[in-house]
Image (spheres, rainbow, N blue to C red):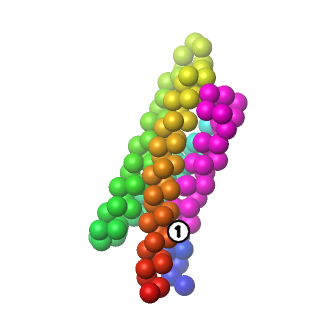
């Protein structure tokens, strides 16, 4: 078993799972979305991105692109949350809907990355 591939697969899957956990729930209800889960999703996504830098194949480039999209979406959501929390009204339902929408875009990128990883595993076996 290749430990590098295990770590790579772990962080791709962890980033997707944490993002899904944050995304789940009514999008406009602030109490259903935890800021620390968003932070954990960002950290896992950034680690997954770093792990994708070494691959020089076409598939590696697509993996990196999906990771960068997820990073941008999640970081944008965190910036929006930080800005909204500093406002007198705090994080409103409209703000949370925007943050969760950003997370949904990142989740889509994570799903594409997981599907690519699985397809790569299936084709490597043949």
Closer-to-camera residue (26/66): 26
Classify 45 as above or below 93. Answer: below
- Quarter of the image that includes the C terminus: bottom left
Q: What element carries label 1?
A: helix
Residue 78 lies in the magenta stretch: no
Q: Give percent across and percent down for residue 69.
A: 39, 48
Are there few (<14), some (14-19), or many (20+) residues within 10 Å of tag 1?
some
Residue that badge 1 annotates: 9
The quadrant of the picture occupied by the N terminus is: bottom right
**Helix, strand or loop for the magenta stretch, by majority:** helix
Q: Which residue lies furthest to the top in this view?
A: 88
- Rendered residue at 55%/36% (across/down): 100
* Residue furthest to the bottom: 126
Residue at image position (45%, 52%) is: 109
Q: Give the range drawn in magenta.
A: 9-34
Horizontal side of residue 60 vs 73, given as left or right: left
Task: Residue 12: give x, y in percent of width and height.
Answer: 51, 61
x and y, in percent, of residue 91 in the image: 59, 22
Asked if residue 99 is positioned above or below residue 87 in the image, the reply reads below
Query: Where 86 falls versus 116 (above or below)?
Result: above
């Amino acid at each position: 078993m290749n430990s590098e591939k295990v770590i790579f697969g772990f962080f791709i899957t962890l980033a997707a799972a944490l993002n899904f956990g944050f995304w789940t729930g009514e999008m406009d209800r602030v109490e259903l979305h935890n800021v620390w889960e968003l932070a954990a999703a960002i950290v896992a996504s950034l680690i997954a991105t770093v792990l994708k830098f070494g691959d020089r194949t076409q598939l590696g480039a697509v993996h990196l692109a999906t990771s960068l999209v997820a990073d941008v979406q999640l970081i944008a959501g965190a910036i929006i949350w930080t800005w909204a929390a500093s406002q007198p009204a705090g994080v409103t339902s409209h703000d949370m809907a925007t943050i969760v929408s950003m997370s949904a875009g990142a989740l889509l990128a994570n799903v594409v990355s997981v599907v690519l990883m699985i397809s790569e595993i299936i084709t490597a076996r043949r």
